[in-house]
Amino acid sequence: MWGGEALHAVARATANPQLRRLQLANVGSVLGSWAYFVAMLVYAYDVGGSTAVALVTIVKMIPSALAGPFTSVLGDRFGRRTVMFGCDVIRLGLMLAAALVIAADGPAWIVYAIVGLTSIVSTAFRPAYQAILPGLARTPNELAAANVATSVIASAGAFVGPVIGAAVLAVSSVAAVFALNAVSFAWSAWMVLGLREPEHVGATRRARNPLGHEVAAGLGTILRHRDLRFLTTLYTAQTLVAGTLSVFTVVTAIEVTGKGDAWVGVLNGALGVGGLIGGAVALALAGRGRLGTDFGGGLVLWGAPLFLVGIVPRAWPAAVCWAAIGLGNTIIDVSANTLLQRTVPDEVLSRAFGAVQSLLLGAIGVGAILAPLLIDALGARGALLAVGVVLPALALVSWPRLRAIDRRVAAPAGTEVLRRVPMFSLLPEALLERLAAESEQVRVPAGEVVFHEGDPGDRFYVVEEGEVEIAGKTFGPGEAFGEIALLRDVPRTATVKAREDVVLRAIKREDFVDAVTGQSDAAEAADALIESRLAPA
């Protein structure tokens, strides 16, 4: 049943024009980035051999890890759509400049500098992208489905992008690949330009604090929140192991299985296929609402296959194990990103993603350094066994905490009944859940008055159970009242009386007004409702 709900969620995510446009922008960004990086490695090798390849890799990774906490401030200080569009335009210009330098046989250091700048600019795009998602999604399943699509695009991009880059290189030149990437960023910018920034997000971003304070806010939020701190620690451990994978892929293909260089491509392909399969699995799992334990399962899928290859050093079992790693990687990304989006306050969400992004990039770099050291010390199979046991062991000892996170992150009581109110159904899921969390349950015995005509308006009400009578009309479960006094700033226009024992969900005046007036669609729906109720009078 939950699988059907998950499929329904992805259908809704595809039907959501804002989410669809955002994912199309992501396609342009991801595919082009991978295609140009392949061309960059070829260019570097032609210019300076393996030393230049290592240099350009460092230039791409290290500045990104250092810049992430600073550039992610932009996503919280300014409109996230604006930040993403600006990043695309800047990257477009940089790619065109690199193409011209390469075509003119200009100095290689200029090209390397452009690559470094492009990587730094990209660190502002990804946190803003992740932070805008909750405001565009309308339900938890839709948000999870959007994260699944994001992860699948990343996996497919890592597989398809290099193929595109290699194909263009085969018939043209390195400069042509860079020019093609400029086109991909232009496509992404066009898609982003059509997005509508969620209005409630912009309303929270007004203060201008010193840069150091704003940079620290994202990481500080994670460190102060025990669940986020715990989850980020596990996520960093997983990416530390992920950093060893590029080395282990080569060693497994050549030394462990004895298949040679060609098998490196087979294992990488299996990893990409597993990532695509993982999208369907993560989507089905999302409907259960157990993101914490899904994350733990992903940890097991990441580590256990390495351990198994150390025990059974055979070629095709290794390919299956690499596919399992790709599957686990998608599950981890989807569950971790969704948990962050649903837990971190919106006003620091971009900075939180920037902090996590930097931690993960740093962990990948450390893992890449550790892998050859472990191989020298333990041998190839010994290193696979030692690294492979780490994540399953962490998942085992962390399981009770992950289950507790699932209980705490569940949608607040009252979310579903609020979603049945037409004006609330138009709100982003993150805002709807915040309203539910801030609401309170009120019980009124049969025959008693909820409020009298002429009373000051202090709360908005939604009927959860039972019925109330207003001006001779009956209101039952899922119906709401009290909006006129709050939005028109007038006394109550009618007396509300319980026809039977009723359970109401009450929302404070300021919370209701901020939510409804901060979202144009909801405000229009509320105005239309008020007009329809006042018309007969």
Image: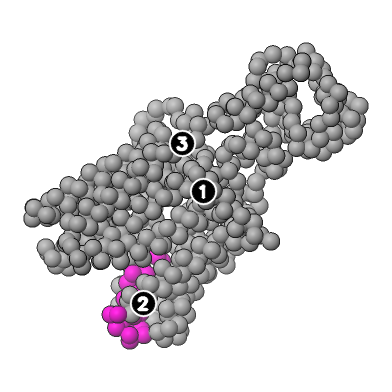
Distance from Cα at disc 3 to Cα at disc 1: 22 Å
**Residue at the (28%, 41%) spot, across then down:** 89
Specify the segment rendered in magenta. 240-262
**Residue at the (54%, 63%) spot, across then down:** 280
Q: Is residue 411 visible?
A: yes
**Residue designated by label 1:** 340
Q: Amino acid at mark 2?
A: Val
Q: Does 433 appear above or below 517? A: below
Whether pointer 3 and pointer 1 mark residues with C-beta atoms closer than 8 Å, the reply is no
Q: Position of residue 474 (x, y in %)?
A: 84, 30
Total marks in image: 3
| Magenta-span inclusion, residue 41 | no
Tag nearer the camera, 2 or 3 = 3
Whether residue 269 sits left or right of residue 279 in the image: it is: left
**Residue designated by label 2:** 266
Whether residue 409 sits left or right of residue 128 in the image: it is: right
Q: Position of residue 303 (x, y in %)?
A: 47, 71
Q: Amino acid at mark 3?
A: Arg
| Magenta-span inclusion, residue 244 | yes
Q: Is residue 56 visible?
A: no
